[in-house]
Image: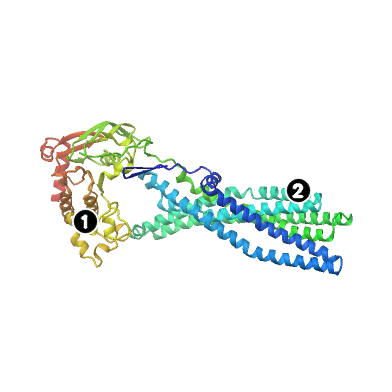
Amino acid sequence: MTIVNKGIKIVTIKPFPKTAFKYLLNECIMPCKWAFIVCLLLVFAETGVSNFINWLLAKFVENIKSGANPETLHLALWLVGIIVVCNIVNIFLPKQVLMYRQKHLYFPVQERIYGRALEYIFGHSVNYIINKQTGSLLAKTNQINTLQSTFSVVITQFWWLISDISLKIFLLSVINIWLGILFVFCAGIVALVNYYANKPSDRLNEMQSKAESLYSGWLVDAIANIRLVKQFNRLEYEKKRLSTLLQQYIKIKMKNMLVWFSSYTGVGCFIHLCSTLMLTFSVYLWSKSLINVGDIVFVLLTLNSGFMWMMELCVDYRRFQNNLAYIQAGLEPFIDKHEIEDLPNAKVLKVKKGKIEFKNVGFAYSEQKRIFDGFNLSIESGEKVGIVGLSGNGKTTLINLLQRAYEIQEGQILIDGQDIKTVTQASLHQNLAIIPQETVLFHRSLKDNIGYGVKATDKKIRQAAKIACADEFIRALPEGYDSMVGDRGCKLSGGERQRIAIARAVLRNSPILILDEATSSLDSESESIVAEAINNLLGKQTVIAIAHRLSTLRKMDRIIYLEQGTVAEVGTFDELAKKKNGKFAKLWKMQQLEKKD
């Protein structure tokens, strides 16, 4: 369901079905059911033409057996002509079936599933995504999109086989009812033998899919952090780690291949026994004058293209089971319910002043120790508040709760009197501008990174860069604002990346600004430049600044010192710095001594 409310798009997506079979049925087949039905009809027509040719060949043999005369010659020529036409149709029809299947089934379903998958992944909370390996999520997205080969098995193999066997049963029954019954019996026995012969491979298919997904995740993780791997001289360690997993994967695959070889051989031998039985019975019927020579020819052609196709069922069934296991392993992130969802009647957050209130907030990460218990804090409209405290006392958690990265268990968080649980996440994030400790940049141009999330002209992007003290270093680059920043901004220094984040916040122009340790990882020179850029940014917005370096909070209206999830001290920078035996004062003195050293 998609609702558009005054420019904010609210998207609610249901989880995917929990089993691979239901996923194929509900998400892939039903949305394109008419195209799927047409594909089945086309395949049925294809098998009909093939069996009709065999029928014509049998009639041709029976016709010429009676000797050469004008009547038999005339019928023989007609039969040859029809066979030629049918063979021509048999050349073009399979290609048309394939083209129709690709255009009206495979590609539309592929496009729909990719869109649904990406929307559902992006709908997960940040916490969920960061706890999953990027490579694993990518691999799982690819796993659930192995639809073309799966549909190929279902349509071109299973349905082809069902259609072909059904027509053969009908035609054999027309020749002699006992031939049809014996063929049904043999086909049923072959199917059962095939099913149980392949049963041991089910578990192996599942293990193989999981091992492949895990290997992909580890590989992407190692490549993404290749700089760290080389810095710590851990190339051999990573190679050995990946090699161990790869060996396990190959071992499972080899075992699976042995199971397949055994089942394929066993089923093949059984099929030949059934073929011998059918042929022997046909000769017996012929000896009793119940069928003619042409009928025996049809039986021979049917056995050749019938039971031999049943031989392939062993392979096709295994492929289908493998695909189902592969898809099932990939469904995990798409069946996990979104941890944080908009309410059905969620409204758009309207911020006119920017007042923030934490009312009796209670929160804990899973079953861990509670971070906040009855926490209260009010930040007035346009107020600049610094949040300080030792690590692990709730500073970053407070910011995460304001962004609704996690759901609070008790209490309320209000912005201009509106509970953030009752508004859309999109409108909440639209009203927050964040400058994080570690700026994340896309491997795109500087212009694209600065203008990310807003529609801005080149002129406005340059103006934002000037306010952020970034214009000078950008223009010094060979390609200026069109310069690519590299993976995660690796071509820029820490201070340069932070200034790009500030320029991005300038363009966003949100009523609430959050500074999360924005200068903690910078050297003194870079910190000075970034601090100047932040001061240029500060206007009438409500500002919450978390800082490790207390000197960056001098211009804040108020300082909040957090300790064990409670407000331990409140006051201006000067008041707290001069407070005797104060916690902030002690921390400030320690930093002053460190600076002198």
Which numbered disc flags the more N-terminal residue, 2 or 1? 2
Name the disc covering residue 223, or none. none
Q: Which of 423 and 246 lies nearest the eye of the viewer?
A: 423
Q: Amino acid at mark 1?
A: Lys
Quarter of image, res 347: top left
The correct choice, above or below, for 383 with respect to 52 in the image is above
Horizontal relation, residue 263 to residue 186: left or right: left
Dot 1 falls on a residue whose secondary structure is helix
Give residue 252's position: percent from left, percent from top: 56, 53
Q: Which residue is mark 2?
A: 185
Give residue 449's position: percent from left, percent from top: 28, 56
Q: Which residue is mark 1?
A: 460
Q: Residues within 10 Å of mark 2 (few under 14, many from 20)?
A: few
Residue 135 appearing in the image? yes
* Coloring scheme used: rainbow
Which residue is rendered at x = 75% and y = 58% of the image? Answer: 302
